[in-house]
Image: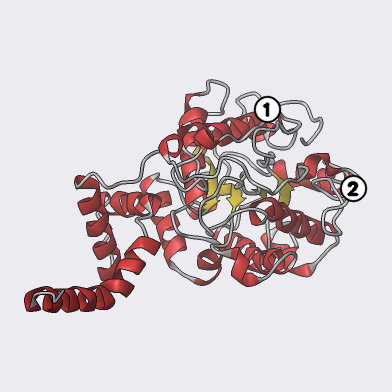
Amino acid sequence: MKQPTHWINGGVIFAMALLIAGPALAQIKEEPIDWNRAGELHRRSQRGEKLTAAEQAYYDRARKQREAGQQRQPAAANPNAPLTNAFKATPLTELGGEKYKGEDGGLYGGGRNEPPAAHLAAARKESAHIRPLDAQGKPSADGKIALVSIGMSNTTQEFSEFVRLGNADATKSPRVVLIDGAQGAMEALAWATLPRPWDTLMSRLQTADVSTQQVQVAWVKLARAGPARLGEFPKHAEEMKAHEVKILQMLRQRFPNLRVAYLSNRIYAGYATSQLNPEPYAYESAFTVRWLIQDQIAGKAELSFGSSKDGAKSPLLLWGPYLWANGAKPNKDGLVWLPEDFTGDYTHPGNSGRRKVAEQLLKFFKTDSVAKAWFLKTGGAAGSSQ
């Protein structure tokens, strides 16, 4: 049967339209709105910061999608999320003498979760210098001890909840000021090579009326976006380590009274639906942290610590809270990660996930023998560092 001419012409036109629009449609499908990035752009816009043309376009597209009701549903309602993952591993804190890709267990190696005695003694010595300082860095009874966070979207989401919990805790010293310096989309490469994250950090310090001389402690939690393209373990972890060395050196240069940096690893990513930072890369981020600390303990010059007059290049490094658990299986601290603890990409923490990390941070700073001396109103007797 002969088809009407207008059907044929219409079909040709429709096919051509699909051919032309295909790449664009595929790109839209491949690049959904990152609502964490959109939220960061919104906050910057609300603070009066000028967005670049590309950022403004991204922000406008996110606003239109939100107004049209096209935002992705919360994690629990996402039918495409894999609720199980083939990757299984033992938390580094429990690995002991066993091996993971040639690496033994323990936060500090050799199956040990405590720093060597000499490093712990050095940490206590550095911590003894942490005290309320005025804007010029002079000791002052009504001065400030600023604790800043450094990292990407996960870090700012978690630390902002910690700020809320910490400021509501009656045992925290009123001299301790919590500043969320972490920022959405600012992964390790950005902190190591771009001025933007540092400019934003300085702006936030200024807003909080905190000087560079008053920043004395940092919580650092970093990752690389798309680590699979960097190579399998240990390549991606080694590249991360090189970035973090630069970042730690830049921290010390900008904040001359920065004494201690607490480092943490990624949370579980076994439910992740993208290649942003899935397993095993999230688990393996702990080895980057450990190698940095081990290098400092071994006396590597690039991570030397102490006073500025002695040429210190880095703050003293210690583990902060270890944040990985094998999904629903509790780690030794009772921490578990369930699908409902995440947003729709199962990489960023949802409200319950943020609170879990915030609670781990608050518990850590209140009980760690090095940290509690300056974090709490009354300090505390020295004991275990973990």
The x, y position of residue 272, in whole percent, is 54, 49
Type of amino acid at the residue the image marks with label 2: Glu
| Above or below, comparing residue 194 to residue 376 in the picture | below
Quarter in which the C terminus is drawn: top right
The x, y position of residue 229, in whole percent, is 60, 70
Specify how the rendered protein is coloured: secondary structure
Residue 142 visible at all:
no
Type of amino acid at the residue the image marks with label 1: Gly
The x, y position of residue 305, in whole percent, is 73, 58
Location of residue 381 by image quarter = top right
| Above or below, comparing residue 253 to residue 96 in the picture | below
In depth, the one of 37 and 320 nearer the eye is: 37
Which residue in the protein does label 1 denote? 379
Locate residue 195 relative to residue 383 in the image: left or right.
left
In depth, the one of 86 and 184 nearer the eye is: 86
> Circle 1 sits in a helix, a strand or a loop, which is it?
loop
Which residue in the protein does label 2 denote? 98
> Circle 2 sits in a helix, a strand or a loop, which is it?
loop
Q: Residue at x 68, y 54 (%)?
A: 280
Whole-angstrom CA distance, mark 1 to mark 2, is 37 Å
